[in-house]
Amino acid sequence: MSGAWDEQPAKLLHHYDRTAQRAAHQVIRNYSSSFNLASNLLRGTIKTDIRSLYAVVRIADEIVDGAGHAAGLNNEQCRELLDDYEAQVLRAPRQRLHRDPIMHAYGITARRCGFADEHIRAFFTSMRRDLGDQSTNEQQEFDAYIYGSAEVIGLLCLQAFLVDQDVNASDRQIMEHGARKLGAAFQKINFLRDIANDTEFLGRQYFPQLQDDEFNDAIKAELVADIRTDLAAARHSVALLPLDARIGVVAALELFNELTNDIDRLTAAELLSTRVSLSPARKTRVLARIPRTVLKKDNQKKGSK
């Protein structure tokens, strides 16, 4: 009798874990069709971990960018919410049960993946930047913002991909560089997609090139070239990723590469009046073009251990 009773608490906790992780999945489903599509191609616990990470990142972004101001909060109130949320995220791995299902799911992931507090703090530092002076005047400021808002997210994703993987230092360095560059590319692409809204409604100018000049075709071409450089660096590291992660990463990369191609075809004036997006049918076609070679196990370097 006692044996059956002893098993019951474990079942209850497992049920709550799964419920929390399903709740985290709803966040990515409702906020990013592209990332949701790519995450569906991940395998095993990696899929769950990436969804749980995305959920807390999305909520932080909503505090500073979307729901916070829509709820009538001023910048100071949003900052207080963000500070409190950062504290919760940093505590999450040390607490087995959370009343917030999203934080509960994230806590499971952060424990399993060993997320570094310094990466979490860097992310929230960049989020706070959006609640203050909303222009990045110097390249150094822009680079710091990109690091915290995007590159560390790439590093956290990589940490999830490499759980229980024996990777040598050289390969890890290449993958970390690729993860940072892919995160940076995603962020810069979204900046260009949202340039009209950011400039007109939010009063933000992320790109340093726009501090002294109006957005024009020459600046747009320079920014697109920078994005393509980041995407190329990310591609260089893809073959080293574990198979369970590789197809999802390639899917996300190719979807955002397609967005970059669309941005490249538009003039600066057109970008200021439209937001580039991919239809479900185009996303399907993009994914269908992914070469099968990226899915082969022997695509990894033979030197990896």
Image (cartoon, rainbow, N blue to C red):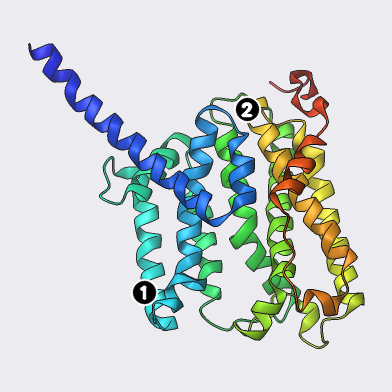
Q: Is residue 203 left or right of residue 28?
A: right
Q: Is residue 295 left or right of residue 130?
A: right
Across and down, in percent, residue 263 comes to 83, 64
Across and down, in percent, residue 260 comes to 81, 58
Q: Crowding at label 2, few (<14), some or many (≥20) Cα neighbours within 10 Å?
A: some
Q: Residue 185 falls in which quadrant of the image? A: bottom right
Q: Is residue 179 above or below residue 305?
A: below
Q: Residue 229 falls in which quadrant of the image? A: bottom right
Q: Earlier in the sequence, mark 1 or mark 2?
A: 1
Q: Is residue 20 left or right of residue 191?
A: left
Q: Residue 161 falls in which quadrant of the image? A: top right
Q: Name the residue rendered at 59%, 40% in the picture.
A: 39
Q: For the residue labelled by badge 2, is the local secondary structure a helix, a strand or a loop?
A: helix
Q: Crowding at label 1, few (<14), some or many (≥20) Cα neighbours within 10 Å?
A: few
Mark 2, residue position: 244
Q: Is residue 95 above or below residue 133?
A: above
Q: Identify the image quadrant of the N terminus.
A: top left
Q: For the residue labelled by badge 1, is the local secondary structure a helix, a strand or a loop?
A: helix
Q: Is residue 256 above or below residue 38?
A: below
Q: Nearer the viewer, mark 1 or mark 2?
A: 2
